[in-house]
Image: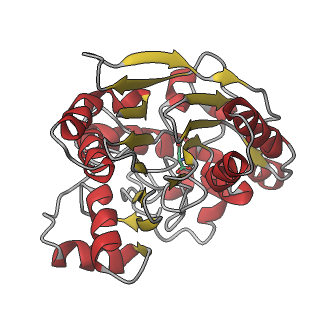
């Protein structure tokens, strides 16, 4: 039995392992572990207190896949509910569908008895407001004209431009996701991901976390993978599906991971940035590959009293962040 998670999963990994030790399934463990991250008010990249989209609305994405039969549930751009991973699981268990977004996801969450919740904390609101007041004078001194801007698309690129960020830590906190993979006593594997996505994203933007095969994938026969980083890249390269397919084709874990990064390195386009992938084979061997040097993830097996930290293998890929807004407005 094992639980593997991104570092912010530290608040949930112990409880997820206790679920497995009590005889629970990999799916139960992943849902339990991720819920604790979604409820963590100090994590501004997942669930409650996540940073909002450009209009100040917190929109959450999450997905879960049961490797036993690859049943899947996912939600995208859902507002007003703290636990998208549980809504995703209920979609998997109760609907003939895989992915619900926006108002439909919210309606389903209510039908499932999930409690409504204001996700935007005063702290997250003030970081959002301060950034936008600096960058978008057209929005007015109190941002009251923001919603009426006819060219919101221009400002999305500007507000996330790392060259305009005051400090590196500010930019680092603008993205993030919780990734979790579990393998239970029966050998069943589950992969899940949950995020509030890019801070100041365009309303309705989905990342990789609600897209099966992009941000998460699990197949008991071969293994599992999850991603954190620039979701657009993982969607375009089908990153987690392609990792598991490489394992299926007989590649060693290290080769499967490195090939996935090399594939990302061949993407073109304007926005190429961070990407970190955790992968595990069906025998619980695991590794991470990342273009972000020095990054770590955590894992805990049933015989460990505490989780351990280990580093992703660094595989550099090209990074590019054009600034089309400034070029055609200044
Ligand atoms: N993958 C997430 C997204 O694109 C963000 C992140 O993990 O940094 O929404």
Q: Is residue 130 visible?
A: yes
Residue depicted at x 47% and y 44% = 133
Q: Nearer the viewer, residue 121 or 129?
A: 121
Q: Nearer the viewer, residue 328 or 290?
A: 290
Residue depicted at x 76% and y 34% = 255
**Direction from residue 282 to residue 321 in the image, left or right:** right
Q: Whole-percent x and y of residue 229?
A: 59, 41
Residue depicted at x 16% and y 64% = 116
Q: Whole-percent x and y of residue 96?
A: 38, 84
Q: Is residue 321 visible?
A: no
Q: Residue furthest bottom?
A: 96
- Residue 41 quadrant: top left
**Direction from residue 21 to residue 124 in the image, left or right:** right
Q: Whole-percent x and y of residue 37?
A: 29, 39
Q: Nearer the viewer, residue 176 or 52?
A: 176
Q: Whole-percent x and y of residue 1?
A: 34, 34
């Amino acid at each position: 039995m094992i639980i593997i998670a991104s570092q912010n999963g530290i608040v949930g990994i112990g409880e997820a392992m206790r679920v497995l030790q009590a005889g629970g399934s990999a799916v139960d463990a992943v849902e339990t572990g991720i819920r604790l991250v979604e409820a963590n008010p100090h994590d501004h990249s997942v669930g409650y207190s996540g940073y909002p989209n450009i209009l100040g609305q917190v929109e959450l994405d999450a997905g879960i896949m049961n490797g036993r039969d690859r049943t899947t549930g996912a939600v995208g751009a859902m507002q007003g509910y703290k636990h998208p991973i549980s809504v995703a699981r209920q979609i998997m268990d109760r609907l003939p569908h895989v992915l619900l977004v926006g108002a439909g996801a919210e309606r389903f969450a209510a039908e499932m008895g999930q409690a409504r919740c204001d996700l935007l904390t005063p702290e997250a609101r003030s970081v959002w407001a301060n950034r936008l007041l600096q960058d978008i004078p057209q929005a007015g001194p109190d941002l009251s004209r923001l919603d009426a801007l006819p060219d919101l698309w221009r400002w999305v690129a500007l507000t996330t431009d790392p060259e305009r960020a005051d400090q590196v830590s500010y930019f680092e906190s603008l993205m993030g996701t919780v990734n979790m993979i579990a393998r239970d006593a029966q050998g069943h594997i589950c992969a899940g991901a949950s995020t509030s996505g890019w801070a100041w994203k365009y309303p309705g933007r989905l990342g990789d976390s609600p897209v099966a095969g992009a941000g998460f994938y699990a197949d008991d026969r071969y293994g599992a993978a999850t991603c954190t980083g620039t979701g657009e890249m993982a969607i375009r390269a089908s990153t987690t599906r392609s990792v598991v397919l490489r394992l299926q084709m007989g590649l060693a874990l290290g080769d499967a991971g490195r090939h996935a990064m090399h594939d990302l390195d061949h993407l073109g386009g304007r926005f190429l940035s961070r990407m970190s992938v955790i992968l595990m084979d069906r025998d619980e061997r695991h590794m991470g590959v990342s273009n972000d040097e020095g990054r770590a993830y955590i894992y805990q097996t049933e015989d460990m009293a505490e989780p351990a930290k280990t580093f992703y293998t660094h595989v550099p890929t090209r990074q590019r962040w054009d600034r089309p807004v400034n070029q055609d407005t200044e």
